[in-house]
Image: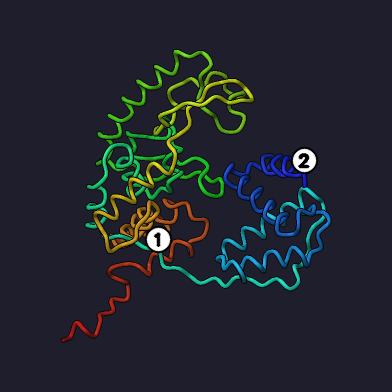
Amino acid sequence: MGRKLLSELRRALRARHYSPRTEQANVDRVRRLVRACGMRHPRDLKPGEVAGFLSDLAVRRGVSAATQNQALSALLFLYREVLARPLGPAEGLVRAKGSPRVPVALSRAEVEVVLGHLDGTPRLVAGLLYGGGLRLLEGLRLRVKDLQFSYGQILVRSGKGARDRVTLLPRAIQPALRRHLEQVQRVFRADLADPAWSVPLPDALAQKVPGAAREWPWQWVFPATRTFVDRRTGRRHRSHLHPTVVQRAFRVAARSALPARRATCHTLRHSFATHLLEAGHHIRTVQELLGHRDVRTTMIYTHVLANPGLGVRSPLQSF
């Protein structure tokens, strides 16, 4: 398999506006298929061989059902959209067994303790994740124009599933966020001194709105500390802060504050949903704030409420 197939795969994914992460994941899965099948071209593989590769993921490597399904989707896309040869039924495919997982949510006191162990930009990002129910990348990809201080709202653009939504911008975090933006604006003004500098823009916006890449509203709320040069255009860019910066800081804070609990940045989103339901907010409202397509996804948080709606008391309480 040469680079031509992978280039065609990338073009097909970009034409359908898949995210860069999805693009890279699909490319990686095709590469693994080719290596597992002795470096043969996917066009020469039989459906049973593809099914064997997917089964091996579940049987020998023990991957989760979600990981196996993602690999299956990537290969179905390859054969349908790039090779124009749909795979059809994958006979003999061994499916990884999935099981429902109850999300981990921290109590309000635990969230307060963890946030207290953070400072600087990671503290601000974590505050937005918990205060608005954001995913980590949704928070890091915020542009200045997405923060609506007067309405107390955040516009989340192209979230999971390429969907936009509106969520909460907590008033408690607004003063610190405004001070942070003043620092970001100073960096932005320094960047403008380089005529070849611009911020990366989504889709074809650079052609639709010339000059937008050097305007303040389109700048990242959480920019990276370093710039890079795009080899294709020769222009200098500044990306948003890398997720690992916040993840590492949060991991250290969580281990220090709650050594007996396992918590990640995404735990803050789970905690946001759980605490809203505990406060009596309608599940449909929480669904909209989280950006879930189906309310059944939101309903999983009803299983981690501190006070379930049934009001059941443990028999130990009667002792």
The x, y position of residue 211, in whole percent, is: 53, 18
Q: Residue at x 48, y 14 (%)?
A: 194
Give the CA separation, mark 2 to mark 1: 48 Å
State which quadrant residue 54 falls in.
bottom right
231 vs 306, left or right, is right
Q: Residue at x 79, y 57 (%)?
A: 86
The x, y position of residue 176, in whole percent, is: 26, 34
Mark 1 — residue?
A: 283
Look at the numbered disc 2 and give the secondary structure of its residue.
helix
From the image, state whether disc 2 or disc 1 is nearer to you.
2
301 vs 238, left or right, is left
Q: Residue at x 16, y 86 (%)?
A: 319
Three-letter code, disc 2? Lys
Tell me whether circle 2 and circle 1 mark residues in contact (CB < 8 Å): no
Three-letter code, disc 1? Ile
The extreme front residue here reads 38
In the rendered view, tell whether residue 52 sits above or below residue 243: below
6 vs 311, left or right, is right
The x, y position of residue 222, in whole percent, is: 39, 34
Mark 2 — residue?
A: 4
The front one of 229 and 201 is: 229
Look at the numbered disc 1 and give the secondary structure of its residue.
helix
In the rendered view, tell whether residue 240 sits above or below residue 284: above
112 vs 47, left or right, is left
In the rendered view, tell whether residue 212 sits above or below residue 307: above
Checking the image for residue 163, the label placed there is: none
